[in-house]
Amino acid sequence: MHPICSGRIAARLSFHYLPSEDYNPRMESTLSFLTLLTSGLFAGAALHVTAVEHPARMSPGASLALQEFRPSYKRAAPLQAALAVICFLCSLVVWRLTGQWAWLAGGLSVGAVVPFTFAFIMKINRLLLDAALPPKDEEALILLTKCARLHAVRTYLGLLGFAILLAQSIQQARLH
């Protein structure tokens, strides 16, 4: 490839932090805080479901677990989705303001749970939530077990994102 062409492509793909006259450090601080807060809340909620709620739900058997899953899911899903989306959007803005890739990486890790959920978990959830045609105990046990394994991936993504964002926040605080 011609050096001038490769330079143009690299310039388009790279991001350079250029503070503008309308840069607002208070906005950066607020969005950094919101990014860290929502990632921590998401990771904590996901860890609670994976380590505490789901094992407790499964202990009395698949039939009762399924009865508990439905109201729990209807309360948790909107909260977790909102936290992941807010974290991602705030991290994107902070990355654009600072040029620090860790904000983008952490936000992407947490935000990735949304498409992951649609791609791998929603079909299982629909089967578990279908009150008109509920799965039999054996099928419910298989679906709930698979759902738990997939939710663990969401937990890892959330914890990874939170760890990246926390490390970046600490590093940034040391510099200021």
Image (tube, rainbow, N blue to C red):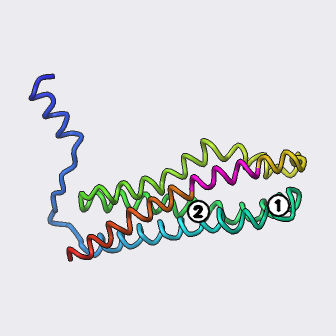
Residue 112 pos. (x, y %): 49, 50
Q: Quadrant of residue 14?
A: top left
Left or right: 106, with 75 as reference point: left
Residue 106 pos. (x, y %): 40, 58
Left or right: 57, with 156 as reference point: right
Q: Amino acid at mark 1?
A: Ala
Q: Secondary structure at mark 1?
A: helix
Q: Secondary structure at mark 2?
A: helix
Seen as rendered, the residue at the extreme left is 4
Which numbered circle lies on residue 80?
2
Seen as rendered, the residue at the extreme top is 1
Image vertical order of residue 93 relative to residue 174, above or below: above
The structure residue drawn at horizontal position 19% and vertical position 66%, both measured from the top left corner, is 22
Which numbered circle lies on residue 134?
none
Q: Which residues are magenta?
A: 144-154
* Disc 2: CA contacts within 10 A as few (<14), some (14-19) or many (>=20): many
Residue 139 pos. (x, y %): 84, 45
Q: Name the foreground residue: 157 vs 24.
A: 157
Q: Name the foreground residue: 158 vs 16.
A: 158
Where the C terminus falls, by quadrant? bottom left
* Disc 1: CA contacts within 10 A as few (<14), some (14-19) or many (>=20): many
The structure residue drawn at horizontal position 35% and vertical position 74%, both measured from the top left corner, is 30
Mark 2 to mark 1: distance in Å? 20 Å
Q: Amino acid at mark 2?
A: Gln
Image vertical order of residue 162 relative to residue 170, above or below: above
Where the N terminus falls, by quadrant? top left
Q: Which residue is mark 1?
A: 65
Residue 133 drawn in magenta:
no
Magenta stretch, main secondary structure class:
helix
Q: Earlier in the sequence, mark 2 or mark 1?
A: 1
Left or right: 102, with 84 as reference point: left
